[in-house]
Image (tube, grey):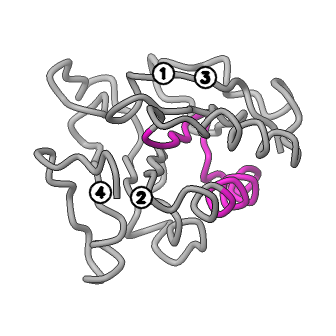
Amino acid sequence: MRYNKIRKMDISNGPGVRVSIFMQGCSFHCKNCFNPETWDFKSGNEFTDETINKVLDLADKDYIVGLSILGGEPMHPNNIKATTRLAKAFKEKYPNKTIWVWSGFLFDRDLKDKEVLNYVDVLVDGQYVDELHNFTLKWRGSSNQRVIDVKQSLKNDKVVLLDEEKELVGV
């Protein structure tokens, strides 16, 4: 398991100031992906307990409202174990901060039974489709992608889209 980079103060991947980690490796290879350097599963840095501790330490500031996990593909079988470990540790330490995850996998088809979703607040799901790109969309690049309120979706056993007025800045 590997990661590409960690941003200690990210304002573009979710609401508020967040810590972001980009997992390494993706098999989707979407046309005009904004992060093709994360495709190779062998590149990047080794994901270890020290990686988790670094993310937790970076988030230990009042102005950090949450963690964003992107890629690459954080939910790929090669990465989901690390993503789950990180999300669980983050929620245990910071229960009132949010976790946002971006994935090409679909919530209702691929992910709804995965342990990681017990810790995730918002999931942006669906592969980026260049032909559906829209600059006006919030938190996603193409109109096929959904911004999902994971807690409400699990509770109601159906996809519940995030109310963008509320945005889940803090739980």
Viewport quadrant of the N terminus: top right
- Return the residue at label 2: 106
Residue at 48% across, 29% down: 30
Q: CA distance from mark 2 to mark 4?
A: 10 Å
* Relative image position of residue 54 (x, y in whole percent): 76, 36
Closest to the camera, between mark 2 and mark 3, is 3
For the residues bearing labels 3 and 1, Cβ distance under 8 angstroms: no
- Return the residue at label 4: 148
| First of labels 1, 2 by sequence position | 1
The residue segment tinted magenta is 65-89
Residue at 67% across, 61% down: 84
- Return the residue at label 1: 33
Q: Is residue 131 above or below residue 114?
A: above
Task: Give the residue type that dot 1 points to.
Answer: Cys
Task: Give the residue type that dot 3 points to.
Answer: Arg
Q: CA distance from mark 1 to mark 4?
A: 21 Å
Closest to the camera, between mark 1 and mark 4, is 4
- Return the residue at label 3: 7
Classify mark 3: residues with Cα within 10 Å, few (<14), some (14-19) or many (20+).
Answer: some
Q: Is residue 59 above or below residue 35?
A: below
| First of labels 1, 4 by sequence position | 1
- Return the residue found at the far left: 165
Task: Name which quarter of the figure residue 156 lies in.
Answer: bottom left
Classify mark 4: residues with Cα within 10 Å, few (<14), some (14-19) or many (20+).
Answer: many
Q: CA distance from mark 3 to mark 4?
A: 23 Å
Q: Is residue 149 above or below residue 69?
A: below
| First of labels 3, 4 by sequence position | 3
